[in-house]
Amino acid sequence: MPRRPLARAGTVLLCTVAALAPDSAVVEVGGIGMAVQCTPDTLSGLRVGEQARLATSLVVREDSLTLYGFADDDERQTFELLQTASGVGPRLAQAMLAVHHPDALRRAVATGDEKALTAVPGIGKKGAQKLLLELKDRLGAPRGATQAARPAAASGPAPWSEQLHTALVGLGYAPREADDAVAAVTPQAEAALAEGGRPAVPQLLRAALQSLNRAR
């Protein structure tokens, strides 16, 4: 049987951003470059050539070492706690944080919100039910109303579009290019909303990048 990957104790990297990709960043620490897997939210706050602070978690497998980076310690700790549930590896844990902030996940688990979890790519109805049971006593109670309420904001641009636009600009695209890419994937996001789900930002980001590549 394959051994479950181990997440080592997290550390904080004070680094310089060397390069950005759709799902990762290359950062330089003491002259050494390291690839760090990040969510769109985290990537949107990084700029090439600028210094950054990343809370990281090292996932150790028999044949690889993978570094995951987060905007703050709360995201990193949630990432590690999610992996204590059966069937949740680092990729799925990161996908959950790409769709929901930590407090939104805590609220979903506390209220038994299956739809919030099935909005994450890779989680079906049965998987969501199982996760709600396993994570109930692990994630803890929501810590603040403001962050948890973001996905349900009633005014201004939709949260997914703001998140996507910020991620694209963070990847080096001009604001106008980002506007066009957001418009291109809006039907896909609206279809998800019509089905009672929430747009998955990682999937929308990939689709937006494809539309930008076709336009060039």
Image (cartoon, helix red, strand yellow):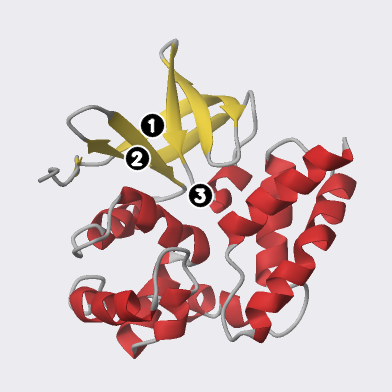
Q: Secondary structure at mark 3?
A: loop
Q: Can the viewer see residue 42 in this picture?
A: yes
x and y, in percent, of residue 124 in the image: 39, 74
Q: Eyeballing the image, is 71 above or below 114?
A: above
Q: Are marks 2 and 1 in contact (CB under 8 Å)?
A: yes
Mark 2 surroundings within 10 Å by alpha-carbon count, few (fewer than 14), some (14 through 19), many (20 or more): many
Identity of the residue drawn at 27% across and 74% down: 131
Q: Eyeballing the image, is 85 above or below 55?
A: below
Tell me if 52 is positioned left or right of 183 in this view.
left
Residue lying farthest to the front in this orientation: 1
Residue marked by disc 1 = 13
Residue marked by disc 2 = 56
In terms of image quadrants, where is residue 183? bottom right
x and y, in percent, of residue 104 in the image: 44, 74
Identity of the residue drawn at 23% across and 74% down: 135
Q: Amino acid at mark 3?
A: Thr
